[in-house]
Image (cartoon, rainbow, N blue to C red):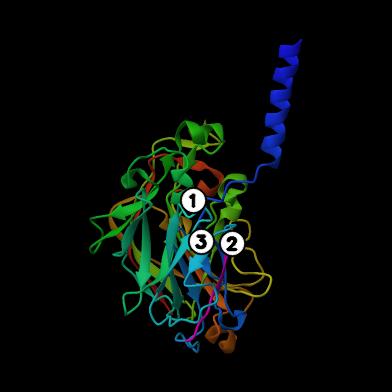
Amino acid sequence: MKNFNLILLLIVSCFCWSCIRPELPNAEADIISCDVDPLILRKDPILQNDRIQILVKSSTDLTQQAPTFTLTPGATIFPKSGTVLNFTKPQIYTVTSEDHQYQKKYEVSYIISTIGSKFSFENVRLENGKYDVFFETDQNNQNIMDWASGNAGFSLTGASSNPEGYPTARLADGKVGQGVKLTTQSTGNLGAIMGKPMAAGNLFMGEFDLGSSISNPLKSLHLGVPVDLVPKGVKGFFKYTAGPVYREGGVVQPNKKDTWDIYAVFFETDANLKFLDGTNKFTHPNIFSIARVTDAQRIEASDWTAFYIPFDVINNQTIDQQKLIDGKYSLSLVFTSSIDGDTFAGAVGSTLLIDEIELTH
């Protein structure tokens, strides 16, 4: 009995000690949010793994900017949050975790330049050593826009160990130089268990919300980047091959064949609409015009084939020129290897190649 009481006392003591001992210092070193003067913004700051892009109006004085940051608990940052710096070139910030064991560097850029109208896809980097990310640069070779894709979500499945096996990847032999290869890929056992057995290759102007990709995939597409042009059409070159077996919800549909899609949406942003998503990309009342390939254009082609799609204005609207100057209009240009891939319908192996894309305006 004495031994039992002694053991019980030790257990209770350990439990009490675990309750009152101080928490270990936080080991995370991340920037959670970035805040700047909203009057200079064309779009909310874009936070990525190791970089932050702040799109601002052309009248902004880049030599006197002082962004502020929210960090993971206990972390510190250098230069200090709110420090006035010259952002005519990107600045490097270093975040140190509360336990001082980890550091993370962020490249913070203020971007005045808007995207151009010609896209040759020659700029690409390897993200996290796993997958390709295409990006656009200005005349000073500064990154002004990352093309978004679902690659970050696909990486969670572990279905590929090399960039070539991801849905969105570089194409070494494009129409001219390098191009883009979009392939509908199997998401393996994990994807099948989660009811998401495939991932279409996609590329779009906007951001991919990894957090929503599992719970609400249609909401994971944040479509749109600010533009200072009014688009009239989209042209370029493509090749396409449909995969052999079409499935919906993992079930073979022998009478269906996969096909591809290219579309662009030009819309006005406001306090309530920062971007479009998969639920309202063709229906939101703020949409000004839409361009989309027709059923007749969605052919299979083994040679580079030209396409052109015009923008159709919705409800005879007119452009507010001051809003255009202030960056209140956004555009998303979207490419996908499976037209219904956002609902996990399509054929594994469907491949869309694109290159030399141009916006007429």
Which quadrant holds residue 347? top left
Q: Position of residue 250 (x, y in %)?
A: 52, 33
Vertical arrangement, residue 174 with respect to residue 197, above or below = below
Q: Position of residue 238 (x, y in %)?
A: 33, 58
Circle 1: residue type: Ile
* Quarter of the C terminus within the rendering: bottom left
Vertical arrangement, residue 278 with respect to residue 229, above or below = above
Q: Nearer the viewer, mark 3 or mark 1?
A: 3
User: 104 or 51, which lies in front?
Assistant: 104
User: 328 or 267, which lies in front?
Assistant: 328
The residue at 45%/34% (across/down) is 188
The residue at 45%/47% (across/down) is 200
Q: Which residue is mark 2?
A: 281
First of labels 3, 1 by sequence position? 3
CA gap between label 2 and label 3 equals: 14 Å
Q: Is residue 295 magenta?
A: no
From the viewer's perspective, is 16 left or right of 112? right
- Asked whether residue 256 appears in the rendered view, the answer is no
Q: Position of residue 220 (x, y in %)?
A: 57, 54
Q: Which residue is mark 3?
A: 207
**Part of the protein shown in magenta:** 64-71
Q: Which residue is mark 1?
A: 339
Circle 2: residue type: Lys
Name, please, the residue furthest toward the top. Answer: 1
First of labels 2, 1 by sequence position? 2
Contact (Cβ within 8 Å) of mark 3 with mark 1:
no
- Asked whether residue 71 appears in the rendered view, the answer is yes
First of labels 2, 3 by sequence position? 3
Q: What secondary structure is found at the residue carrying circle 2?
A: loop
Q: What secondary structure is found at the residue carrying circle 1?
A: loop
